[in-house]
């Protein structure tokens, strides 16, 4: 009996050491666990490990190789908008399933699952806020929500935001990232391209500024509409920007495409993009561009000019 207990005790002690050795010796395992816990982040480009905290402080840009890791809409709003100035718009708009679409699963189930998983109602967030003290209307797409695909809610939220901006005479900035139109809403998704474009045209007619920021990846119907309609089009370094996918084009043309095809750098060279701005400089660049395009009527010079022309009209 005593012997039995003794051996059991030894066994458990042995197990304890064995377990300890196991957990201690496999630092790779632990490393992987810590990456999974979100404490560390492994750069998908150069493989260097960085503390997530440090990486976030550098706006998710790899300190080693400058790779721009994907950021979600929360993080993006935090990066661009001044503290405590963000006022979200149209959060009540929810997607529906008018076609009762089914692929591998029901669209309605897919929507619910995604909403529960990432805590967003759809693939774009819109709102009003300030950027270095200047008011703007900002739309931020979120790739986590069905690949940032554009359905009715994305279209409606962006359109309403642009209309608000036109009314308030605010500049519009949209941070794009999208796989294109959302096939589960069929024609209704495609209609959003025209709807958003029309709102942007009215914004332009009111002589107001619109700047899209193209991030990795911006493709399909988004590229074919509002991503390319900016007064000034900015892109993040190395972002993939295109309409159809590389493979589709290669198969259609039966030609091998160049390495830098559909990159921000290639588009800049061919005049489709006006500038490539590293994420760490994005906020200041946007603020500068917006400041340059502020209505000048309120500056003393213009007031003086107006007074002078009024006087000369009166004199006539
Ligand atoms: Zn890296």
Image: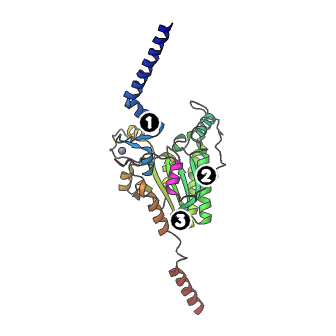
- Image x and y of residue 303, in percent: 55, 81
Residue identifier under label 2 = 157
Q: In terms of image quarters, where does ligand 1 lie?
A: top left
Residue identifier under label 3 = 133
Residue furthest out toward the bottom: 315
- Mark 3 close to ligand 1, CB under 8 Å: no
Q: Look at 41% across and 44% down and name the residue there.
A: 51
- Image x and y of residue 83, in percent: 55, 58
From the image, state whether disc 1 or disc 3 is nearer to you.
1
Residue 242 visible at all: no
Neighbour class for label 2 at 10 Å: few (<14), some, many (≥20)? many
Neighbour class for label 1 at 10 Å: few (<14), some, many (≥20)? few
Name the residue nearer the viewer: 37 or 168. Answer: 37
Neighbour class for label 3 at 10 Å: few (<14), some, many (≥20)? few
Name the residue nearer the viewer: 207 or 111. Answer: 111
Residue 244 position by quadrant:
top left
- Image x and y of residue 185, in percent: 60, 41
In the image, residue 279 sits, relative to residue 38, either above or below, namely below
**Which label's residue is closer to the chain start, 1 or 3?**
1
- Quote the CA–CA distance across marks 1 and 3: 39 Å
- For the record, the magenta segment spans 64-85
In the image, residue 153 sits, relative to residue 301, either above or below, namely above
**Which label's residue is closer to the chain start, 2 or 3?**
3
**Element assignment for label 2:** helix
Residue identifier under label 1 = 34
Check whether the beta carbons of the residues at disc 1 and disc 3 lie within 8 A of each other. no
Q: How is the image coloured?
A: rainbow
**Element assignment for label 1:** helix
Residue 311 visible at all: yes
In the image, residue 289 sits, relative to residue 10, either above or below, namely below
């Amino acid at each position: 009996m005593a012997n039995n207990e003794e051996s059991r005790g030894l066994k458990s002690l042995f197990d304890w050491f064995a377990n300890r050795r196991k957990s201690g010796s496999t630092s790779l395992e632990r490393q992987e666990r810590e990456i999974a816990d979100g404490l560390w982040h492994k750069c998908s480009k150069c493989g260097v490990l960085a503390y997530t905290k440090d990486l976030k402080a550098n706006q998710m840009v790899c300190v080693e190789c400058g790779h721009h890791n994907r950021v979600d809409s929360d993080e993006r709003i935090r990066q661009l908008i001044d503290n405590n100035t963000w006022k979200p718009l149209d959060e009540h708009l929810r997607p529906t399933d008018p076609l009762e679409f089914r692929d591998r699963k029901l669209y309605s189930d897919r929507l619910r699952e995604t909403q529960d998983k990432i805590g967003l109602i759809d693939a774009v967030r819109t709102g009003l806020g300030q950027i270095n003290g200047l008011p703007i209307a900002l739309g931020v797409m979120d790739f986590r929500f069905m690949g940032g695909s554009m359905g009715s809610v994305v279209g409606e939220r962006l359109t309403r935001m642009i209309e608000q901006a036109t009314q308030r005479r605010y500049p519009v900035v949209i941070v794009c990232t999208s796989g294109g139109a959302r096939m589960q809403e069929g024609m209704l998704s495609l209609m959003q391209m025209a709807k958003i474009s029309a709102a942007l045209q009215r914004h332009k007619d009111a002589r107001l500024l619109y700047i899209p920021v193209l991030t990795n990846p911006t493709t399909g119907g988004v590229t074919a509409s509002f991503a390319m309609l900016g007064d000034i089009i900015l892109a993040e370094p190395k972002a993939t920007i295109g309409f159809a996918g590389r493979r589709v084009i290669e198969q259609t043309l039966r030609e091998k495409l160049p390495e830098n095809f559909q990159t921000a750098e290639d588009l800049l060279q061919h005049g489709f993009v006006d500038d490539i701005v590293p994420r760490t400089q994005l906020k200041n660049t946007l603020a500068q561009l917006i400041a340059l395009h502020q209505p000048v009527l309120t500056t003393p010079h213009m007031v003086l000019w107006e007074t002078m022309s009024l006087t000369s009209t009166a004199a006539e």
